[in-house]
Amino acid sequence: MIIETNRLIIREYNQDDFEGLKAIICDAETMKYYPKPYDENGVQRWLDWCINSYKDNGFGLWAIELKESGEFIGDCGISLQNIDGEILHEIGYHINKNHWRKGYAKEACQAVKNWFFENTEYNAVYSYMNKENVASYFTAESNGMTLLKEYHDGAEMLLVYMITREKWMKELN
């Protein structure tokens, strides 16, 4: 599976992506809204989970490369997440902090949203994030998603954004 955008190539992960992924999910600043940054064992579990998800679900988080240089800059894709007690399809992403504020997350999320509605029969896709993660909810909004609800998950207040197939189809016209 490969998705191409103007500036990005979104493709399935492979074991060669270990170091690029490590630079992202082992970084404390990038993982600020996670319980803690990952260690090397966690990076391997992440890669294995993504690769298995392709087989089990037909989707997962996919690696993002810059089209011009082939540089690995992050991931974006669909995962099944427990969101306020429901297992829902979520668009998630992680971008290397050296590439923040360049529109790559928005571009990747839009491409993944289009892939989701073009290749599945599901009627909605979600994104959720810590309420303090302003960049993530701006990305969700720029991807045509609207705020569905807020909820407490332990000590965290989370926001849930959603876009329906119907709204996506209207965006295309």
Image: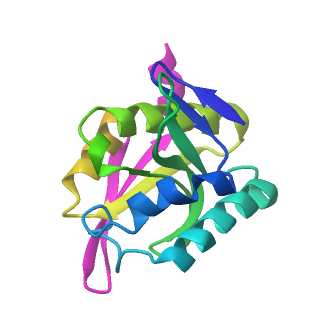
When the figure is inspected, residue 53 is found, relative to residue 33, above or below; the finding is above
Which stretch appears magenta? 144-173
Looking at the picture, does residue 155 appear above or below residue 114? below
In the image, 150 versus 20, the foreground residue is 20
The residue closer to the viewer here, 147 or 98, is 98
Residue at x 38% of width, y 41% of height? 145
| Most distant residue in the bottom direction | 154
Residue 119 showing in the rendered view: yes
> Which image quadrant: the N terminus?
top right
Which colour scheme appears in the figure? rainbow
| Residue at 53% over, 31% down | 70
Which residue is situated farthest in the right direction here? Answer: 55
> In the displayed image of the protein, which residue is found farthest to the top?
173
Q: Nearer the viewer, residue 138 or 65?
A: 65
Residue at horizontal 51 percent and vertical 75 percent from the top: 40
Residue 18 is inside the magenta segment: no
Determine if residue 144 is in view.
no
Residue 124 in the figure: left or right of residue 84: right
Relative placement, left or right, of 12 versus 158 is right
Residue 154: within the magenta? yes
Looking at the image, residue 25 sits to the left or right of residue 100; the answer is: right
Please provide percent x and percent y for residue 125: 53, 48
Task: Examine the rendered structure and indicate whether residue 53 appears above or below residue 74.
Answer: below
Residue positioned 28% across, 70% down in the render: 28
Question: How many numbered marks does the figure carry?
Answer: 0
11 sits to left or right of 108 = right
Residue 47: % across, % down? 62, 63
